[in-house]
Each structure stands twice: as C-alpha cells, then as structure tokens.
Image (cartoon, rainbow, N blue to C red):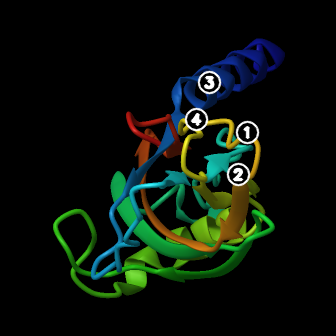
Amino acid sequence: MMRGLTLLAALALCACAGSRSTQVGASMILPPQARTMKMEQQQLFLMANHLNPDHLPDYPAAQLAAGPEKARVCVDLVVSEAGEVIWAVPLHGGPDCPAAAEPALAAFEQAVLATVREWQFTAAAVCTFPPGIEKNEDCEGEGVTERQVPLRMAFTFDFSRREGRGRFARSAGG
C-alpha cells in the first residue's frame, strides 16, 4: 500500500513539473538617440544579418519559483565591423523598455547580456557604386567598394513563466 502511494505521489510530481512552461521572445527596436547615417545617392547601406537568432537567454532558474510571471529587458549593443557584439548594456527608458533599473530584473538582465555577447552577425556595410553601375544588394560590379561599418542596435526580450517555469518564444520582428 505504501509503495503504491509513493508511486502515485511521484507520478503526481512529474505531472506537475511537466505542465510548467517558460517563454522568452526577442525583437529589434530603434536605439534611443541613435544617429542616422547619411547615404550619398550612389551609396547603399547593407544591414547586419543576425547569424544565430535562435540563441536566446534562458529564463533565470533562480527566478522560476518566485520571479515575475512576465518581465521585459531591453539591451543596447554595438556590432563591430567583424560582426561581433563588442558592447552591450541594459537599456532603460523609451516606449518599449523599463523606465529604470529594477532589482527584480537584475537576473534577467544578466541572462540577456551573457546571451547577446555570444551573438554573431554579418557586418553592416556601406557599398559605393561608381557612375553607370546600378546599385545591387550583392555590392558587386566593376569599381564597387564595400566598407564594413559598426552598427548600434537595440532589442527587447520578453520573459514569461507559468506554474514556476520560464518561457521564451520568438516575437515578431526579432
């Protein structure tokens, strides 16, 4: 009898653990006070391409039991001419981000910063086309030059959890 109750209790615990879920989503946003790059008529800007967009932070394990059901973290970052994230900091303020640093979000910010520092991109570039050469997104043609440039970007990360487990799902635009 005791053995049956122990088995029943173990099965109940497994069922509860299996019903918990976590989700995190990421979206690119315009960095606040970002400078715009002026292009000449014969120039074309090529946006950095995110090479590992599915590499997302985990919901912080220490927050699973008592952390917020929903949390938003924003990060401001710079992608180098080599496509590496060379600078990243939490972003506060603006329409999409928390107004100020909040102690309850510290673990989420650390998870996001650790993840984005591992992201890789193709470098952003400015292509310059000589007269008579039609602009193209391949940055190809006789006399065409391509100059890789650093790029400042910003992202929001939305974390959610149900029944003690965090979730991360891709948001539109990220």
Mark 4 near mark 1, Cβ–Cβ under 8 Å? yes
Image location (x, y in percent) of residue 171: 41, 37
Q: Choose between 116 and 30: the one closer to the eye.
A: 30
Identify the amino acid type marked 4: Asn
Instruction: Indicate which disc residue 144 carries.
Output: 2
**What distance separates the C-alpha of mark 4 from that of mark 1?**
9 Å
Mark 2 near mark 1, Cβ–Cβ under 8 Å? yes
**What distance separates the C-alpha of mark 2 from that of mark 4?**
10 Å
Residue that label 4 marks: 136
Instruction: Indicate which disc residue 141 carries.
Output: 1
Q: Choose between 24 and 66: the one closer to the eye.
A: 24
Placement of 76 over or under 70, stated as above or below: below
SS class of the residue under badge 3? Answer: helix
What is the quadrant of residue 17 in the picture? Answer: top right
Packing grade of label 3 (10 A; few <14, some 14-19, many >=20) is: few
Identity of the residue drawn at 42% across and 75% down? 105
